Image (tube, rainbow, N blue to C red):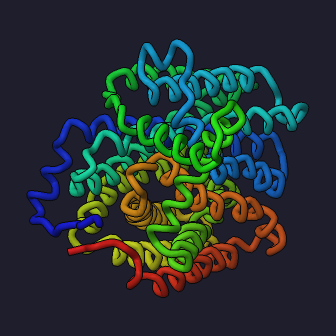
Amino acid sequence: MITIKKQTLSETFSVYYDKRMLRILLLGAISGFPWVIIGSSLSLWLKEDDLSRSTIGWAGLIFAVYAFNYMWAPLIDRIQIPYLTKKIGHRRGWIVLMQLSMLICLLIWSIINPTDNLALVITIGLIIAISSATQDITVDALRIEQIGENENQSMAAGAAMAVVGWWSGYKLGGVISLFTAEYFENVGIANYWQTTFLILGVIVILMNIGLMFVHEPISISRSQKQNETDRLIQNKLGSQNILTKIIAWISGTLGGPVVSFFKKNGFSIALGILGFVFLFKIGEAFLGRMSVIFYKEIGFSKGDIAIYSKTLGWVTTVVFTLLGGLFVIRSGVIKAMFLAGILMASTNLLFTALAWIGKSELLFAFAVIFDDIAAAFATVAFVAFISLLVDRTYTATQYALLASIGTAGRTTLASSSGALVDWLNGDWGIFFILTAIMVIPSLICLWIIKNKLKLSEK
């Protein structure tokens, strides 16, 4: 059972001074940066090549792979990369391999045109998403393994730092992407987005260099426990041959984490947890998927979006994520989840006001700031919530499972966001009201199971 102990303000913030938090910050940035590539950059690239909102929205289906990375998470836990694993470690070897895959994809994007090669553009985007989703499995495992099993205060702080890192990679990467694209456009480069992708490739290389400074703990017990599970299953099969070894390996690898999760929580509560995780961020995802398109349609330039949505948003996110970590530690993760849900719904309504009033830099800044405050609280609470639920024996796989289910709600359903705006005849105000309402079902789920969750918060 995990206990979260209340602390004084100075004690809480002192946890952030641990040098391991810098490593977690970098890991978060590595995880967040690919969303710039296949999120705002791809969306604007397609928009400025005169593709429809619906096409851009459905292109977002590539994010759905994040919802299924738990399916191959056990394989990432066990399969070693030739040469890389031996040289730089199991976790870092997988991250470098996926970063190399994304770098190659960016090089291909830099030489093609989306109007003439839309299928190829989306296919490359899908490969980037798969590489990023696979990378996240290892990043999350390496992030959790930076902290000792009984260091609950550091785990909560680590959750906050991981969120700060993710948003830093996403927001600052977005600033670089948007300003670079606008600069290349202004100097007369016709394929300015293609050239921008080369700059983003340089950032990928720099992140790999930084990764070499992240310590990877050597874990012998994890492999021993995996092998023990394999032997137990093989003994139950009653024979010792290559077929039973394969069956035991597959069963232990894929089935063990799932069985452990349902056994720990009970079937009905486990289903309630999965329902909440699936539904919690749907409204935020609908808004996020169409936000850049909305900004462009009401008259904001790429520079405006970079300043208000990315730069200003990043500062706000960093500050309030750290405060969100403080709130989680002192008030408990359940209260933090309810507060985050209410904040998300409330701030979405600010975009309704912006849609009805029209272009207003003041209101735009106000809406972005409060939306990022809500997102910061929601994300750090969500990361802490699922981190507290996982069994440390199956950390990587169970975290990937819960994170993937959360992503499933955000990606699969939110892919219809563009079609919803079109169905509403471009009525952005009503669209944002609907995104605010979308958070209610998840809070109902949490209210039903909150007293039965196996979390001890003091």
Horizontally, residue 410 falls left or right of residue 388, namely: right
Whole-percent x, y for residue 149 in the image:
27, 49
Q: In the rendered image, which quarter contains the N terminus?
A: bottom left
Q: Determine which quarter of the picture holds residue 190.
A: top right
Is 404 in front, or is 90? 90
Is 425 in front, or is 340? 340
Q: Determine which quarter of the picture holds residue 195.
A: top right
Horizontally, residue 247 falls left or right of residue 82, namely: right
Whole-percent x, y for residue 386 in the image:
43, 61
Picture mark count = 0
Residue 416 sits above or below residue 104 on the image: below
Horizontally, residue 341 falls left or right of residue 333, namely: right
Residue 346 sits above or below residue 92 on the image: below
Q: Can residue 366 be seen in the rendering of this structure?
A: no
Horizontally, residue 332 falls left or right of residue 203, namely: left
Identity of the residue drawn at 60% across and 60% down: 405
Identity of the residue drawn at 73% across and 46% down: 62
Q: Can residue 450 be seen in the rendering of this structure?
A: yes
Identity of the residue drawn at 54% across and 77% down: 272
Is 43 in front, or is 29? 29
Q: Residue furthest right?
A: 116
Whole-percent x, y for residue 429 in the image:
66, 76
Q: In the rendered image, which quarter contains the C terminus?
A: bottom left
Whole-percent x, y for residue 295 in the image:
63, 57
Identity of the residue drawn at 48% across and 80% down: 446
